[in-house]
Amino acid sequence: MTGPPPQETTSEKTTVAPARAWPVYNVERARAELIAMELLTRGVSQVRIRHSTRLSRKNISRLAALVAEEAKKPPAPRNVCRNPVHRTAAPDGGSRPPGRTPPAPSKPAEPAEPVQMTFSLD
């Protein structure tokens, strides 16, 4: 008597290859670019940077343009507080939750009559 054929379990394995190869970074070049950017922010001339880092004139001018652009538009600080009570107010003062305004500062009490100070003449 022949029974049903045994079912074969086939598992297909697929390998997903990355779209591109991983980039290979030149550590010395990256270090030289970081040093060049630091020197540019200190105001060192591009000629001195070129001699000290051995970068090309084109790369130094590219880094100088990048540093100048970042100096014109600094990154906005991020607020990481999750509780809205502890958040800092925006420069326009509009990011405060309703009903949670701080109390107005009280003025110091003024005396009814000004006090005359006297000094001894010795």
Image (tube, rainbow, N blue to C red):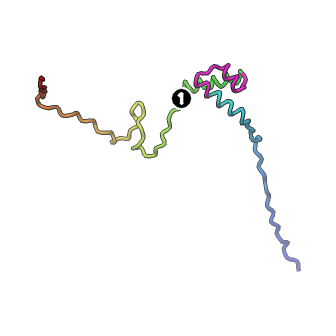
Quarter of the image with the N terminus in it: bottom right
- Residue in front for this viewpoint, 117 or 109: 117
- Asked if residue 50 is among those painted magenta in the image, a careful observer would answer yes
- Image point (39%, 44%), residue name: 85
- Asked if residue 31 is among those painted magenta in the image, a careful observer would answer no
Give the left or right position of residue 66, taking residue 6 as reference.
Answer: left
| Quarter location, residue 73 | top right
Give the left or right position of residue 22, taking residue 107 as reference.
Answer: right
Where does the image place residue 10, in percent across and percent down from the top left? 81, 63
| Quarter location, residue 93 | top left
Within 10 Å of disc 1 (Cα), the crowding (few <14, some 14-19, many 20+) is few
Region rendered in magenta: 38-56
Quarter of the image with the C terminus in it: top left
From this viewpoint, which residue is outermost toward the bottom?
1
| Residue to which mark 1 is pinned | 74
Where does the image place residue 121, in percent across and percent down from the top left? 12, 23
- Residue in front for this viewpoint, 84 or 111: 111
- Image point (21%, 34%), residue name: 108
Compared with 121, 25 (above or below) is below
Kindly report the secondary structure that dominates the magenta region of the rendered protein. helix
Where does the image place residue 106, in percent across and percent down from the top left? 24, 36
| Quarter location, residue 52 | top right
Where does the image place residue 41, in percent across and percent down from the top left? 58, 25
- Residue in front for this viewpoint, 70 or 18: 70
Residue type at tag 1: Pro
Give the left or right position of residue 54, taking residue 113 as reference.
Answer: right
From this viewpoint, which residue is outermost toward the right?
1
Give SS at disc 1: loop
